[in-house]
Amino acid sequence: MSLTISLTAADLRHDLEDLESAEDFLCYFDIPFEPAIVQVNRLQILQRYHDYLEGHQQNGGELVYSAYRALLERAYEDFVHSDACTEKVMRVHQKASGIARVALGSIGRARS
């Protein structure tokens, strides 16, 4: 049996404002999870979720309940089958593996 949630965008945004932890988000979207996985990776899961939401919006995707849920489930699953060091979500893991990001505005000729 599939549960269909019908919320307005404003209702959904309001509900999400009250959520604080990865566990809150997973419970809100009724996604089964292993507490041990979330305990170790909570910040990485939320960052990956944020990245997925941002990418979804940039590609013109509509952010409705089902999209929010699917993207959170995907972010969580990334850490069920992998770990923070492998996924390199956080900047500290990116730096440790030699990945560096430079803002486009900081690239230019040196001034004499």
Image (cartoon, helix red, strand yellow):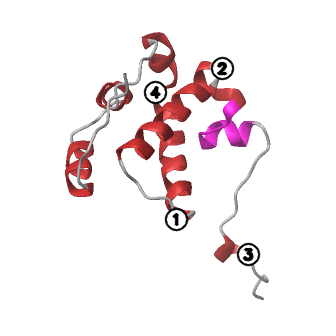
> Which of the two marks, 1 or 4, is nearer to us in this view?
1
Q: Badges 2 and 3: C-beta atoms under 8 Å apart? A: no
Q: Amino acid at mark 4?
A: Arg
Give the residue pinned by disc 1: 60
Give the residue pinned by disc 3: 107
Name the outermost residue toward the front.
1
Q: Amino acid at mark 1?
A: Gly
> Which of the two marks, 4 or 2, is nearer to us in this view?
2
Residue sitting nearer the eye, 37 or 102: 37
Label 1 crowd (10 A; few <14 / some 14-19 / many >=20)? few
Q: Position of residue 23 (x, y in %)?
A: 35, 24
Q: Amino acid at mark 2?
A: His
Query: Along the polypeptide, which appears first: circle 4 or circle 3?
Result: 4
Residue stretch in magenta? 87-96
Q: Position of residue 108 (x, y in %)?
A: 75, 81
Determine the secondary structure under disc 3: loop
Q: Residue at x 51, y 24 (%)?
A: 41
Query: Along the polypeptide, which appears first: circle 4 or circle 2?
Result: 4
Query: Along the polypeptide, which appears first: circle 2 or circle 1?
Result: 1
Q: Position of residue 35 (x, y in %)?
A: 42, 12
Q: Badges 2 and 1: C-beta atoms under 8 Å apart? A: no
| Rendered position, 93 above or below 41 | below
Give the residue pinned by disc 4: 42
In the image, taking residue 100 as reference, residue 90 lies left or right, namely left
Q: Badges 4 and 2: C-beta atoms under 8 Å apart? A: no
